[in-house]
Amino acid sequence: MDKIFELITIGDSTVDTFLKIRDATVECDINHEDCKICVKYGSKIPVDSIGHGVAGNAANVAVACSRLGLKCAIYTNLGDDEPGKSIFDELIRQQVAPDYIRTNPGKNSNLSVVMTYQGERTIFVYHQDWYYKLPNLASCSWVYLTSMAESFTNSNIMDEVCHYIDKSRAKLAFGPGTYHLKASVARFPKILERCQVLFVNLEEAKTILGIDEAEKVNVRDLLSKMLLLGPKTVVITDGEEGSYATDGQVDLKVGILSSQVIEKTGAGDAYASGFISALFLGRSLAEAMVWGTINASYVIRTVGAQNGLLTREQLIKYRGELKGLTATKF
């Protein structure tokens, strides 16, 4: 069968409500590692601004890669409610094929509230318990598997993805979600062994490897240990420290772009999208890291996970203006 799609994402979609507040404090432990945002209990908290937007890791990556010129589809579950209709309509508007979108009668769609304070966000998430069953997917070049509801453990979705990868020879990228991590990513060795690229942030890497969140770690050791789980390439993002990647042959690091941070939601998805798009176009691992960095740097300049996403023309233009931005061995 001829390849119809260049990327199919698999995972949940949601509608985010964004609240920007300033009447709060941040309290941290003595090492400034474990920090909590505090608001006055039982009070009405003033909100500086409010907004809404379609999001969710699978939707974010599908939209971002569509902007970057890839022909994209998404397998996601929606409720038969107004948020579900909003998600469906926005995906269509962003030229993401609806072939594998499933609307579930009598169910509510996923919703999140994103509270932003001093540029950092705290997210309250509602995940509907969906029944996951992989549709009869057309052939594609890449699959991006990402966050799902906890009910994924009651399905065969992970095995179905493996079967599809074996049959189609698509390349698999995996960005584990909260419930993948809770269930333990190591429980899915068949996914990891088929994984072309595994995307995690530093905290997620520690969780997967059973390392205490407060423990100081050597990133090169983390990358090496993550590779032993099976993926061909591992990418670890670390906020303002930049990102790291290894394919077992070379360990690379790239810094971040200095930019005004308005809101960080979707930065990881934008990075993964730039990275995958670069690999799809035949760029090197080092250049894929740069594409991811540029795309993420523009998302955090706006409110919402998708508003700042770049087109391929824009990204290539900005890349040409940033010749000094390179991934280096470390």
Image (cartoon, rainbow, N blue to C red):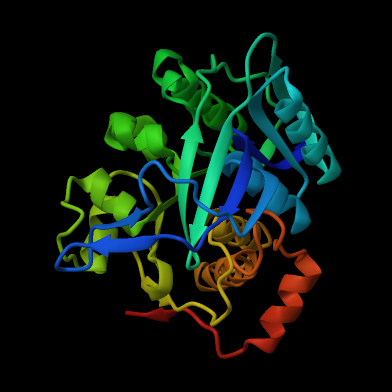
* Residue 189 horizontal side relative to residue 71, left or right: left
Residue drawn where x is 76% and y is 65% of the image: 312
- Which residue lies most toward the bottom here? 324
* 116 to 294, vertically: above or below: above
* 6 to 164, vertically: above or below: below
- Which residue lies most toward the top here? 106
Q: Residue 278: percent from the left, percent from the top?
A: 63, 63
Across the whole image, how many numbered discs are drawn on residues?
Answer: 0
Q: Residue 33: percent from the left, percent from the top?
A: 23, 63
Is residue 285 visible to us here? yes
Residue 311 or residue 82, whichever sits in front: 82
Is residue 247 visible to us here? no
* 162 to 151, vertically: above or below: below
The quadrant of the image that shows the C terminus is: bottom left
* Residue 1 horizontal side relative to residue 43, left or right: right
Residue drawn where x is 49% and y is 77% of the image: 256
Residue 25: image quadrant is bottom left
The quadrant of the image that shows the N terminus is: top right
Residue 121 or residue 228, whichever sits in front: 121
Q: Residue 11: percent from the left, percent from the top?
A: 56, 33
Residue 175 or residue 45, whichever sits in front: 45
* Residue 92 horizontal side relative to residue 58, left or right: right
Residue drawn where x is 75% and y is 37% of the image: 3
Residue drawn where x is 62% and y is 31% of the image: 168
- Which residue lies most toward the front here? 43
